Amino acid sequence: MSFQKYPRIGLQCARFICKEAAEKPCKSPHQVRIPLATRQELKDAKRIMLKFGSEVMIHPKGNLLAMTRWANLIEQMAELSYQGKEIICITSGAVAHGRKKLGNIVSNKDFKVSKRPAAAVGQPNLMYLYSTLLNKYNIQCAQLLLTESDIYQDRNRKILKDSINKLLSLGVIPIFNTNDAVLPQPDVPCPTLCDGIKLKDNDSLAAILSSELQTDLLIILSNVDGVYDKAPSESGARVIYSFTKETRKIVEIGEGSARGIGGMDSKINAALWAVAHGTAVVVANGMTIDSIKTVVSGKKFGTMFIDSSICQDDNTEQIASEARRQSRTLALVSNNDRAACINKFAELLDARVPEIIEANNKDVEDAEKSGYNQVLINRLRITPGKIKALSVGIRQVAETSKHILGKVLRKTLLADGLELTQITVPLGVILVIFESRPDVLAQIAALTIASGNGLVLKGGDEALRSNMVMKSIVDDALKTIKCEGAVGLVATKEEIADLISMDQYIDLIIPRGGYQLIRFIQDNAKRIPVMGHSEGICHIYVDKDAVAEKIFKIVIDAKSDYPSACNAVETVLLHKDLMEGDFFAELCCRLKQTEITIHSGPKLSKFLQFGPPLAKSMKKEYGDKEMCIEVVDNMQEAIDHIHKYGSSHTESIITENKESAEAFLKKVDSACIFHNASTRMSDGFRFGLGAEVGISTARIHARGPVGVEGLLTTKWILRSKFAHTAGEFNQKDGPKWIHKALPIN
């Protein structure tokens, strides 16, 4: 996502630029406003125009007003007004409501009420309801019925603009409608204002007024979820969440509105014109409760129209599609060139430490102001030491990448002149969803470049600045091998639901975050494999033959080195013999000195008259300087406990008895099992992998810390000298199977 062509910081910077842009001297007094470029900026909109379509206003069972829905729209308008935002409303519904009113007094059922009298009757009833509902919130509204002369004549338009600005300054909500009782709807557009648009319906009226009144955001509410790539009624139709003038060329437009005179084609044309003239536009479903607030909050809701000359389209599907396309290019880059690209990435990281730290400090500051807990803030924070460790690990990845792709795993002579080879190839495109830790972005990007995979990343909102800087460094490195776009970054949480259904682009999902995030991905990614771990409930079993100083050293490191990491220990299982003497008291004392809170397991609490409080659950990932201690009778009970309450992540045994250690290593069914070592050793960098995309507890494909090799699959290459066919092997005088293993050079 980029909107650097015209520098702007929120709404505090200049909202106008010369039409020839900042690079050239201004040759014209006419100036063009810059529309808000991303959904995140919509919450900063000060002046908001709402356009209610007929389908939103009218009940589907007749020309009755949809009062429940309408009341919700009015409530949202009031809430935005209380927030200090200026609200302008353009309403439809007068014609449909008027036809209902007139239909009640006409006995002839075949009589069709024409538009103009219907509008004349429906409009005052419509305004009465607006006024009544808004008065409940102590908000005054004003009616403005417009004809072409009010828009097309400069003098009239200036008077109209002045009146509206005065109303808004008084906190009044102007309610607009075209005066359908008298409007002739000419074919000739306004020569001074409306180049490229005609005043023919409320959509075009909204676009013209949004430009004239310098509106920040125009929300067009319809009865569908946005603009679709084809008619919504057609099978496979999908909402286009980001729309540019280039998108317009490939979209099939369905039927117009059943009640109003506009339709989706009208909305698209009006929206594109409004964006080109400085107003952000979202077309959304007004039938959905709190639709206005959802748009203004910046969530992915409805179709946002984007000026592609200002903001590169951040459409999620386009990012995923580009990652797929560039992944095939990346896979063809030589191993040495990919290694050079990764080394360049490490160099750029070292060179841009101040920039990374500055962005990260702002993220941390915002997270603290927002009340994020200390665990998340610790994960979010980057230090120069972390960046240095990153660059060291990335250089290790570069060295590994020199021999990773195209590696021959097996070569077989199937028959005379028929040779089969199995080689390593990339998986394709990997989606990684992670929280808090921006250093993860750098690790995963290096690994996917090394393995020739495309990558789509979704980082946490709390790390947006840090992630954007990291992503820019990745992009600069990828430019050296002409593979920009192989790594994509999406901005908002709403993108996740789309991404995990894009099996046409994405081959593997790796979620890295809290239990709820990972469980959501695992439950909802129906067609794409998910690799990762749902929880990091790690155990240390302290055997009766353990040495006290080793116990203290390992247990304290396993919890205090990085308490929020998934490989931090959560439960320590003590052999019952260790409860004799002073060992337990000394252990508790050492843990408390390190500010580690202790919880008791059920059996431990029975040993102690006074002691740590009872743990609420034995299957808990604390993610902080807390742990549970439990007592077991023997090693087998410890193993059974681990299998019952653990998450198959990492377990460790502390003992001087080699037979017990080997039995534990053999029997425990987890991804990583250690002897006399901290669970914190479970890490791709520490394993010599350079970095990791995550730790997998899955039983298919990679398990444990996943490095470059875990991101590869294979393909089979068959070479024939004699045009072999399957059928000829069944012939009496045909070729014969040999199936001889050949040496791998």
Image (cartoon, rainbow, N blue to C red):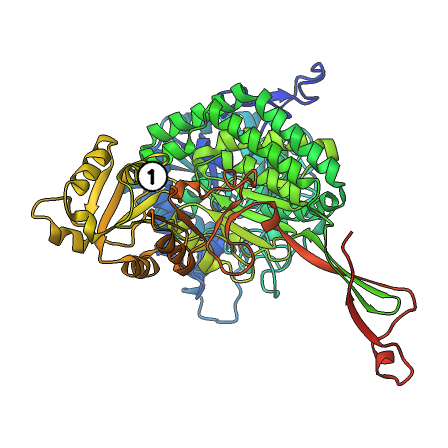
For the N terminus, the image quarter is top right
| Residue at the spot 42% in from the left edge and 29% down from the top edge | 381
**Can residue 309 be seen in the rendering of this structure?**
no
Crowding around mark 1 (Cα neighbors within 10 Å: few <14, some 14 to 19, many 20+) is some
Q: How many numbered marks are there?
A: 1
Extreme residue toward the left, this view: 609
Residue 252 on image: x %, y %: 68, 56
Residue 153 percent location from the top left of the image? 61, 29
User: Residue 698 in the image: x percent, y percent?
Assistant: 48, 58
- From what the image shows, is residue 601 above or below residue 37? below
Task: Classify residue 94 as left or right of residue 137.
Answer: right
Label 1, on which residue? 554
Image position, residue 479 (x, y; %): 71, 32
Q: Secondary structure at mark 1?
A: helix
> Please, what is the three-letter code of the amino acid marked with disc 1?
Ile
- Name the residue nearer the viewer: 319 or 312: 319
Q: Tell me if residue 597 comes above or below residue 410 in the rendering.
A: above
| Depicted 726 relative to depicted 403: above or below | below
Residue at horizontal 45%, vertical 28%?
A: 382
Note whether residue 329 is visible: yes
Q: Residue furthest top?
A: 25
Q: Nearer the viewer, residue 237 or 544?
A: 544
Of the pair 176 and 587, the residue shown nearer to us: 587
